[in-house]
């Protein structure tokens, strides 16, 4: 322990923690500074200067002492202790002035900054205490420890008397601020004295060499402190106190507590062999990191342990990690000195460091494995390469996925920005935050995604999980009565680029007497994109910020929870765009506007209004295909002039290979064979795919032996029909001779996994909007690929014998398009070669938008392509920012103030640096107006029931 007098400990315990704390506060200050008053800014600047000066002086003294090779002075201990105890008290007292009530918690990168303050200042306070303990205990081995512990016991007893007897008597009828400050300062001073004598007594005991193990009576206190108290503390926390300090219910916590206690209790003088002593030394160093973890967990709470002792008496258990840390550190030091007689000090140092690293490295390895398997599962589900088959049976381990999903659910942050600690029933202090960083990139995984992954890889979703928590957040009230009242259109034809730029100004009115959100969806015509947006906020036109989509939606959801002013535009699926504005006060009309760019005059419907963009008089309808760098725009007239081509279908059977269908294989084979007997024309070119979360495809003939393959297929997980259907249709899109008709064979089709429609791929489907389910009687049920896929649209349906398409030539490439009266945009799969510059942006913005859209479509079918010139998410987002064109990866968001914009930029930076398949937060669950009235009615019924129950009890009592 005397090593703590070496000056480098100042840099470790003071300089480094202060620097981290300063950085954390500064990061939050940069976001919220525009919301701070002059008084708030004064406190920020004052404490910033105070801690800055303390850091400079302390670091300078530490470096000077290292250069001079002198020990830390006791005067430093006195000054440092007085400064940090006093500063900590006033700093915590003034947190409300640093973060006033008008600052929403979601804006802060970390919500529990006061806990951080305790954590980063406690090392300085305890280091100062140790300096004073060592100064006042020069001959620790010759001193008695009992009277130190007597003082430790007297202080909580004294405070108990003060709280229960003296203060009530003094404070009767007195409400003075000075009395509160005096009480807190006296409590802080006595707490310092408490820990001084506690550390001093522990230091004296742990420094004694002889007469310690030879007397069996010492075991009377050693066994409780080293073995029973750690296990009892874990048990009380996990059962009696409801995980108040975190979730330590895992068996390994109990096992390590017992093992560490036994290792400490093994007498050193009973082991004569040096090699066995070395093994004991290594074992103690391994478990020492476990004790150090709990020491760090309770470090910010140690000042409150005195209150815990007064309140419940079990507060002494909070001190157990501290006492064991002191004793075990001295035990390791004595073992090191003893073993130095037999082994090189360098070897022993390496053994000590390696032992200390065993548990942290084990945790890091397990977390890295969780990250690998989670990201592998996410890529398979949310970013698959649709141009290839999905044969992942050898690389995906459902048992490991189950463990990973349980860990994610346990460690993920349901509350936003709860920080490093977040003590609650589901988190482990430090470890959960490390898990958030190492596995989840400081992001999260929505409850809906967790359930989907469980259904896909495990076959069913976990229910009533203790860690599942609330999987939704209630959004603002919506009503269909809030609608567009009037609108104005201003279209400008850009001759240089031969396209239209149209502003649509909307006046939206809320005729109800409730605060409402306006929310609608509209479909953009082919070749039409959004290039700007604004919302009138408090009389000013606030233009939208084009931001990363998930970050924008996260900010919007948090703002509407606080009833502030945002407006949001983002793609949902395909060309569908969601449009939201909030809030609308009762009988309020608000103005907002959207700018579109389009190649010719088009019409779209927003809410209850059909709006014409452009001027058909000024520009005639296009009759020729318009080529661009990234694709081609096919006007409706040009498509109708293209020749027709007739294609024949072939059947592609999809067999349920999930765990539920393990006993149905023979039945499925019989169903297919019987259907082909009834329809022999479909035998030609037919294929069969057997799938769960992975799949195998075979040609349907005798040579393929598909029946034997089905019998040998490993049934596991769920029936991931969406992925199989997408791959079949995408891989067949360039076939100019035939097209697939999907026929599903499953006894459990309602349990199939089809969480999203194929609306995102509508253009790639070439008008094929349905699939079929083969029934036991040999008939077919038709299902939609674009809306509620698992719902039956038609029973006893028939498959068309042929289908006609329009054959369009574009850049020497033939493309089949659906035969209808609508225009199409054909992406050519060309990567974004370079970012557009401002010089050519105005005249050629439509071409830049076409290039971005083509790049998006390429990325969509193969998100994990390694060729950087083809698909790359960041290129699409940066290209969107440069051009101002909204893409499915970006959103337009109008915000009320600079703090919201700073929070958006901070979240966007986090999203762009993390895994794009993770989430920023949970989605809001919108509440319609009838749902609100129903909820209010239920609350009213509860109050009435409570009122009448009270009256009944009163009447019963009167009898």
Image (spheres, helix red, strand yellow):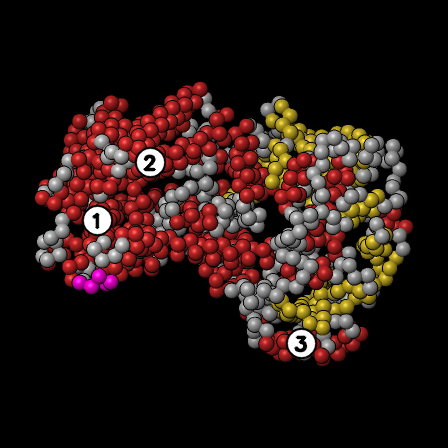
- Give SS at disc 2: helix
- Reading the image, the residue beneath label 2 is 11
Q: Nearer the viewer, mark 3 or mark 2?
A: 2
Q: Single out the residue that lies furthest toward the top.
A: 38
Residue 184 appears anywhere in the view: no
| Percent of width and height locating residue 382 | 60, 54
| Percent of width and height locating residue 515 | 56, 33
Q: Nearer the viewer, residue 898 or 906?
A: 906
The answer to whether the residues at label 3 and label 2 have Cβ atoms under 8 Å apart is no
Total marks drawn? 3
- Reading the image, the residue beneath label 3 is 706
| Percent of width and height locating residue 571 | 66, 44
Instruction: Please give the name of the residue rendered at 9% of the width and 53% of the height, measured from the top-left corner.
Output: 211
Dominant SS in magenta: helix
* 937 over 189 or under it: above or below: below
- Mark 3 crowd level (few <14, some 14–19, many ≥20, 10 Å Cα): many
- From which residue to which does the magenta span run? 272-276
- Give SS at disc 1: helix
What is the number of the mark on residue 330?
1
Residue 352 placement, left or right of 888: left
Residue 479 placement, left or right of 795: left
- Give SS at disc 3: helix
């Amino acid at each position: 322990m005397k090593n703590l007098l070496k000056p480098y400990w100042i840099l470790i315990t003071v300089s480094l923690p202060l620097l981290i704390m300063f950085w954390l506060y500064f990061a939050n200050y940069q976001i919220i500074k525009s919301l701070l008053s002059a008084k708030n800014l004064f406190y920020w600047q004052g404490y910033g200067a105070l801690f800055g000066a303390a850091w400079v002086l302390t670091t300078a003294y530490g470096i000077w002492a290292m250069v001079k090779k002198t020990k830390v002075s006791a005067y430093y201990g006195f000054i440092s202790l007085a400064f940090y105890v006093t500063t900590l008290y006033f700093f915590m007292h003034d947190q409300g002035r640093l973060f006033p009530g008008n600052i929403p918690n979601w804006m802060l990168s970390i919500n529990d900054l006061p806990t951080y303050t305790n954590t980063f200042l406690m090392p300085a306070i305890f280091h100062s205490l140790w300096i004073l303990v060592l100064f006042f205990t020069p001959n620790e081995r010759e001193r008695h420890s009992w009277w130190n512990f007597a003082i430790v016991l007297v202080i909580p007893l004294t405070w108990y008397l003060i709280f229960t007897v003296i203060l009530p008597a003094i404070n009767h009828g007195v409400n003075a601020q000075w009395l509160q400050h005096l009480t807190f300062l006296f409590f802080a001073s006595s707490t310092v004295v408490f820990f001084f004598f506690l550390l001093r007594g522990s230091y004296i005991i742990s420094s004694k060499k002889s007469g310690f193990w030879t007397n069996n009576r010492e075991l009377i206190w050693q066994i409780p402190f080293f073995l029973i108290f750690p296990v009892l503390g874990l048990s009380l926390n996990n059962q009696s106190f409801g995980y108040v300090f975190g979730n330590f219910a895992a068996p390994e916590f109990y096992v390590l507590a017992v093992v560490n206690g036994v290792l400490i209790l093994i007498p050193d003088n009973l082991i004569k062999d040096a090699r066995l002593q070395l093994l004991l030394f290594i074992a103690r160093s391994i478990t020492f990191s476990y004790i150090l973890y709990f020491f760090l967990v309770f470090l910010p709470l140690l000042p409150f342990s005195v209150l815990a002792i007064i309140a419940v008496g079990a507060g002494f258990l909070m001190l157990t990690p501290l006492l064991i840390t002191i004793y075990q550190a001295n035990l390791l030091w004595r073992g090191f000195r003893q073993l130095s007689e037999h082994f090189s000090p360098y070897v022993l140092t390496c053994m000590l460091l390696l032992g200390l690293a065993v548990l942290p490295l084990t945790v890091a390895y397990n977390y890295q494995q969780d990250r690998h398997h989670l990201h592998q599962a996410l890529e398979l589900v949310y970013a698959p390469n649709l141009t290839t088959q999905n044969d992942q049976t050898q690389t995906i381990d459902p048992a490991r996925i189950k463990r990973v999903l349980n860990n994610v659910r346990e460690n993920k942050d349901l509350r936003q920005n709860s920080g490093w600690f977040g003590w609650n029933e589901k988190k482990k202090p430090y470890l959960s935050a490390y898990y958030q960083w190492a596995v989840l990139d400081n992001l999260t995984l929505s409850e809906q995604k967790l359930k989907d992954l469980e259904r896909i890889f495990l076959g069913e979703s976990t229910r009533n999980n203790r860690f599942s928590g609330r999987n939704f957040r209630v959004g603002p009230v919506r009503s269909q009565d809030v609608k567009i009242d009037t609108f104005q259109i201003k279209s400008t034809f850009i001759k240089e680029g031969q396209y239209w730029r149209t502003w649509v100004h909307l006046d939206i009115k809320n005729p109800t007497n409730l605060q409402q959100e306006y929310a609608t969806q509209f479909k953009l015509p082919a070749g039409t994109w959004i290039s700007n947006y604004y919302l009138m906020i408090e009389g000013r036109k606030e233009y939208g910020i084009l931001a990363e989509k998930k970050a924008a939606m996260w900010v919007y959801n948090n703002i509407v929870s606080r009833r502030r002013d945002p407006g949001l535009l983002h793609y949902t699926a395909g060309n569908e765009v969601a449009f939201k504005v909030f809030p609308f006060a009762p009988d309020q009309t608000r103005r907002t506007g959207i700018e579109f760019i389009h190649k010719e005059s088009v019409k779209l419907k927003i809410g209850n209004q059909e709006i014409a963009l452009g001027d058909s008089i000024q520009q005639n309808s296009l009759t020729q295909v318009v080529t661009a760098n990234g694709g081609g725009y096919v006007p409706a007239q040009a498509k109708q002039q293209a020749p027709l081509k007739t294609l024949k279908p072939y059947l592609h059977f999809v067999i349920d290979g999930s765990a539920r269908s393990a006993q149905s294989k023979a039945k499925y084979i019989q169903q297919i064979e019987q259907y082909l007997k009834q329809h022999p024309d479909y035998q030609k070119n037919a294929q069969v795919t057997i799938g769960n979360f992975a799949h195998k495809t075979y040609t349907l003939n005798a040579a393929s032996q598909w029946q034997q393959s089905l019998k040998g297929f490993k049934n596991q997980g769920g029936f991931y029909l969406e992925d199989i259907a997408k791959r079949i249709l995408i891989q067949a899109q360039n076939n100019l001779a035939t097209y697939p008709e999907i026929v599903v064979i499953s006894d459990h089709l309602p349990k199939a996994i089809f969480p999203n429609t194929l609306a995102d791929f509508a253009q790639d489907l070439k008008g094929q909007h349905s699939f079929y389910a083969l029934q036991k009687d040999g008939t077919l049920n038709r299902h939609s690929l674009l809306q509620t896929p698992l719902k039956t649209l038609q029973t006893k349906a028939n498959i068309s014998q042929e289908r006609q398409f329009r054959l369009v030539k574009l850049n020497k490439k033939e493309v089949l398009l659906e035969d209808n009266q609508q225009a199409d945009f054909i992406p050519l799969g060309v990567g974004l070669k370079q970012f557009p510059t401002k010089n050519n942006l105005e005249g050629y913005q439509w071409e830049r938008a076409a290039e971005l859209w083509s790049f998006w479509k390429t990325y969509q079918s193969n998100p994990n392509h390694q060729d950087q010139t083809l698909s790359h998410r960041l290129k699409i987002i940066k290209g969107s920012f440069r051009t101002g064109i909204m893409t499915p990866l970006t959103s337009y968001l109008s915000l009320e103030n600079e703090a919201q914009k700073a929070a958006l930029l901070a979240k966007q930076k986090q999203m762009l640096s993390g895994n794009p398949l993770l989430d920023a937060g949970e989605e809001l669950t919108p509440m319609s107006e009838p749902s609100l009235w129903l909820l209010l009615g239920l609350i009213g019924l509860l109050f009435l029931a409570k009122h009448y129950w009270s009256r009944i009890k009163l009447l019963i009592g009167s009898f």
